[in-house]
Amino acid sequence: MTDLVRFGVAMEQQLLDELDALIERKGWANRSEALRDLVRRELDRAAWGSGKPAVATITLIYDHHVRELTEKLTEIQHDFGDRIVSALHVHLDHDHCLEVIAAKGPARELEKLADRLTNAKGVTHGSVAAAALPASKKRRG
Ligand code: NI
């Protein structure tokens, strides 16, 4: 773990009580761990839509009988071919497919990719989990 820096936080008693209740529910070890997680989550949210490096998984459920939908989803993925790391396709039942796509690149581009896929007509479920790509000490340039 990298060096930790201590700092003081002031907040209203009621807000602190709510934070402690949340910590209990979510299973964080302590307030510091909770604040670190919450700050990271907010940084991920802020990075989304920026040019910063990010990773994302895009989950889709769709009815493959919808006319030209499968072709459309494939075409979108080819447009972003160099951003897609891996894709998993599961034939859920006679009608439905589940697709999980892992992508890496500038957050703004991943957002575009996710929007196009999840908004495609016939996609019944679309969700995205995104995170700012953690800085790597080994990465150059
Ligand atoms: Ni399928």
Image (cartoon, grey):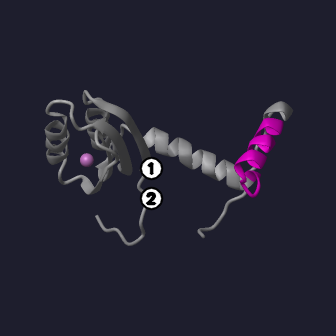
> What residue is at 43 percent from the left and 50 percent from the top?
132
Q: Which quarter of the rendered picture does the C terminus lie within?
A: bottom left
Specify few, some or many for label 2: CA neighbours under 10 Å numbering under 14, 14-19, or 20 or more.
few
Give yes or no for residue 126 being in the magenta stretch: no
Dot 2 lies on which element? loop
Q: Is residue 47 left or right of residue 8?
A: left
Q: Is residue 38 left or right of residue 26?
A: left
Give the x, y percent position of residue 3.
63, 67
Give the x, y percent position of residue 13.
86, 34
Q: Quarter of the image holding residue 77?
A: top left
Three-letter code, disc 1: Ala
Dot 1 lies on which element? strand
Q: Quarter of the image holding residue 5?
A: bottom right
Tell which residue pokes out farthest to the bottom in this image.
Answer: 138
The magenta region covers 16-31
Tell which residue pokes out farthest to the top in this image.
Answer: 121
Look at mark 2 in the image and give the residue it sits on.
134
Give the x, y percent position of residue 46.
46, 39
Specify few, some or many for label 1: CA neighbours under 10 Å numbering under 14, 14-19, or 20 or more.
many
Disc 1 + disc 2, Cβ < 8 Å: yes
Q: From what the image shows, is residue 30 above or below residue 45?
A: below
The answer to whether residue 111 is visible is no
Q: CA distance from mark 1 to mark 2?
A: 8 Å
Label ID, residue 131:
1
> What residue is at 80 percent from the left and 44 percent from the top?
20
